Image (spheres, rainbow, N blue to C red):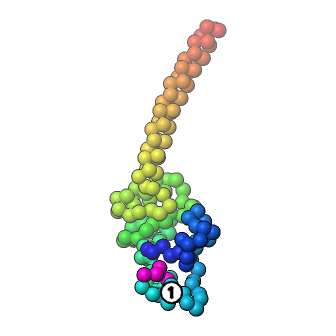
C-alpha cells in the first residue's frame, strides 16, 4: 500500500520528520498545484485503486459444531466461552489448520499443558503431606493411649 503524505511535507520543518500528525494526508487544493493536476514526477493522490486487499471473513464460534462447518475463514472466539470449550476449540482449529484471531493457539495450548503438569505436581505433594500428617496424628493418638 502506498504511503500518502501531505503536499510539501519535506519542504517545511513544521511539517517535518518528527511531526507525523502534521504530515497526514490533506487533499492538495490550489490553482497551480502540480500534485492536484496529477502530473508525472509528483506524489500520487489518494484515489480509487489503492485500497488494501480484503481481509478474510470473520466467524464467531461458540462450540466445536460451529467450527466444523467453517472451511478457510478467520475464526474469532467470543469472550463468553469457558476454558474447557476454549481448549477444545483451539485443538480442533489446530487440527483443521485454521487461524484464530484473538489468540495464539500454540502458545495457549502450551500454557494449558504447563498448568496441568503444575497442578499434578501440587496434588502429589499435597497427598504426601496429608499422608504424613495422618501418620503423625496416629502416632500422637497411640502415645496418648
Residue at image point 47% right, 71% down? 59
Q: Position of residue 73 (x, y in %)?
A: 41, 71
Q: Of 32 and 99, which appears nearest the observer?
A: 32
Residue 30 within the magenta-colored segment of the rendering: no
Q: Of 55 and 144, which appears nearest the observer?
A: 55
* Above or below, 77 relative to 54: above
The quadrant of the rendering that contains the C terminus is top right
Magenta segment main secondary structure: loop
Q: Position of residue 58 (x, y in %)?
A: 47, 71
Q: Is residue 129 visible?
A: yes
Residue 42 within the magenta-colored segment of the rendering: yes
Residue at image point 53% right, 29% down? 126
Q: Is residue 20 visible?
A: no
Q: Position of residue 65 (x, y in %)?
A: 43, 66
Q: Which residues are magenta?
A: 41-45
Residue at image point 61% right, 12% down? 140
The quadrant of the rendering that contains the N terminus is bottom left
Q: Position of residue 142 (x, y in %)?
A: 59, 10
Q: Tell me the residue that label 1 is attached to.
A: 34
* Above or below, 43 relative to 124: below
* Above or below, 49 relative to 86: below
Q: Quadrant of residue 90?
A: bottom left
Amino acid at each position: 500500500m502506498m504511503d500518502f503524505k501531505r503536499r510539501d511535507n519535506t519542504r517545511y520543518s513544521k511539517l517535518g520528520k518528527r511531526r507525523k500528525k502534521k504530515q497526514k494526508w490533506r487533499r492538495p487544493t490550489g490553482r497551480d498545484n502540480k500534485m492536484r493536476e496529477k502530473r508525472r514526477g509528483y506524489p500520487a493522490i489518494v484515489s480509487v485503486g489503492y485500497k488494501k486487499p480484503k481481509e478474510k471473513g470473520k466467524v464467531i464460534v461458540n462450540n466445536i459444531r460451529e467450527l466444523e462447518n467453517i472451511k478457510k475463514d478467520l475464526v474469532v472466539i467470543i469472550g463468553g466461552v469457558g476454558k474447557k470449550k476454549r481448549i477444545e476449540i483451539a485443538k480442533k482449529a489446530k487440527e483443521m489448520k485454521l487461524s484464530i484471531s484473538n489468540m495464539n493457539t500454540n502458545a495457549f495450548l502450551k500454557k494449558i499443558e504447563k498448568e496441568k503438569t503444575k497442578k499434578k505436581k501440587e496434588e502429589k505433594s499435597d497427598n504426601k503431606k496429608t499422608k504424613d500428617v495422618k501418620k503423625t496424628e496416629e502416632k500422637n493418638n497411640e502415645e496418648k493411649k
